[in-house]
Image: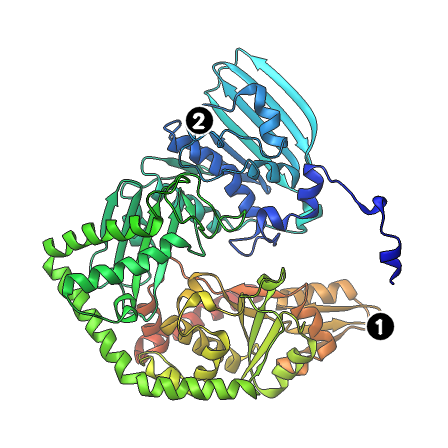
Amino acid sequence: MSEQAVNYDESNIKTLDWKEHIRLRPGMYIGKLGDGSSPDDGIYILIKEVLDNSIDEYMMGHGKNIDIRLQDDYVTVRDFGRGIPLGKLADVASRMNTGAKYDSKAFKKSVGLNGVGIKAVNALSSDFIIKSVREGNARTIEFSAGNMILDRTESGVSEKNGTSVSFLADRTLFGTYSYNTEYIESMIKNYTYLNTGLVIKFNGVSYSSKNGLLDLLNDTLTEEPLYPPIHLVGKDIEIALTHGTGYNESYYSFVNGQHTTQGGTHQTAFREAIVKTIREFFKKDYDASDIRTSIIAAISIKIEEPVFESQTKTKLGSKDMSPGGGVSVRNYVIDFLKEHLDNFLHKNPSTAEIINKKIQEAEKDRKAISGIQKKAREFAKKASLHNKKLRDCRIHLTSKSERAEETTIFITEGDSASGSITKSRDVNTQAVFSLRGKPLNTYGLTKKIIYQNEEFNLLQAALDIEEDMDNLRYNRVVIATDADVDGMHIRLLMITFFLQFFPDIIRRGHLYILQTPLFRVRNKKETLYCYSEEEKTKAVDTLKNNVEITRFKGLGEISPDEFKGFIGENIRLERVRLTNEDYIHDLLEFYMGDNSTERQDFIIENLRLVEDLVEEELV
């Protein structure tokens, strides 16, 4: 019997108060902590939890303006709703399971229902101030790490009704972090798309939407759609959809204004509904995959007391539109789409014809590669048993492990580079896939190439992304190449592959470039690793005497012991991003197409720019 079992008694049983539990287990309330480099990092969830309350006020018809300010990592959200009842302000901010949203009369279709979110923000902030103004009276309460340090009431104030929350995320918990304003702006835009008439001002810039999800689709399309997006609006449901030219399905789904990035019952219902509607309209038993190939769609529904699969509310679990049952989410979405999309297609035969032609082309492509696809699957399945290209990890994104979100696969070139990473990695969460030489330029090629090319076939199998992007086995897909011309070329070829066939890996924020040091600067006492010429210069100035400088030409030159520091806690990753201005076709055509004259002119012009900058520095 172990010593721990022998000593187990009443003294081992502990009861934590609300703030202690949140600070001890923050992942239960806000997901991962993070440093701000990912849109689902905890510091953005804190903003969302505060903003959700203001959005709920607007949805109930109170306060069409919300003001958000970010300064020195200090976030302030001010709405102009009814204001929290002053007598309950402390309870709302610091007493678990306290809120107005248990009363469906006050908040019928709210985002937050459990009375937890704002308390989590309070407990995880080193400075938290909440203020409510109601009819000339105000109350301000200040906390630090969930502990109240000030409570002040005022009367005769001239401020408008509403609630203000200011907070500074606690660095003792989050470590070093910084906000990426692009992620905050994206969050704000989604709120405005879902609440037409709402105006959110962020650091003085106003955001609003007149056309809801139609604006969302038009603003986020990264390619020219085959036809203008179809916009359908009904009671408690809104849908916008079109088709692109790619191979994947792309969805934006929302429940009560909450961006359900992992989908859920409503998104599943939409995917089923679009197939049913199209089949019945054209009176053809088209394959579901052909109908949904390259579809780009947004769906928003509003339901009473939604059930999400986690506190961060990224996946809807509710099966019914209201807790009492009656109408299921599935039937509600299917019935709506069958009626309204069918009507639209009858009234717009030109759009219907484009959709029909697109489906037939997808069917033709699928049948053309079906034999190759089957053989490729068999090959990948057999190869996976003794796949020397993939050195897998023990945990995958699809597992229920707490560390599943940490999973990473490094795509490397050459045995020396993959060998260094393999010896240095965390075998639980980090996998390595080794390329053989430069991969094929896939721009302009069909999906058939994936199955005919051994490298891409095995990579697709390793990532498990052929059928559904939701099956992705790793949270981070990292391209790890040498910091030279050949390495840059391999990066471009791999990014081209993902853009061409699996752009959602980029859209969903899964693709990264590994940053490795270019120089090692050391003396007898200290070693510094530098990622740029500027860092090298500073390192030389810092170490001063007897400095030895090593220039790393490739990943294989970095020893496994050194590499541990570069792919562990101090890993530097650059996320590959797609912005609203990045049209995939245009990007690939310019950088990877046959327009050699245009690209040559671009290179020459930029070389001149670099030469001019160098001359300025020398002067």
Kindly identify which numbered label has been placed on residue 524: 1
Q: Which mark is residue 166?
A: none
- Total labels: the figure holds 2
The kind of residue on which mark 2 rests is: Phe
Question: In the visual, does 12 lie left or right of 130?
Answer: right
Tell me if residue 27 comes above or below residue 466 in the rendering: above
Q: Residue at x 40, y 33 (%)?
A: 108
The front one of 371 and 65 is 371
Q: Secondary structure at mark 1?
A: loop
Image coordinates of residue 531 in percent, x first then y, are 63, 68
Closer to us: 156 or 63: 63
- Give the x, y percent position of residue 526: 80, 68
Q: Quadrant of the N terminus?
A: bottom right
Q: Which residue type carries mark 1?
A: Lys
> Could you classify mark 2 by the number of other residues whose Cα lies within 10 Å: few (under 14), some (14-19), or many (20 or more)?
many
Q: CA distance from mark 1 to mark 2?
A: 62 Å
What residue does disc 2 label? 80
Could you tell which of marks 1 and 2 lies nearer the N-terminus?
2
The residue drawn where x is 30% and y is 60% is: 272
Q: Residues within 10 Å of mark 1 (few under 14, many from 20)?
A: few
Q: Is residue 619 visible?
A: no
- Where, quadrant-wise, is the C terminus in this rendering? bottom right
Q: State whether residue 498 is above or below residue 258.
A: below
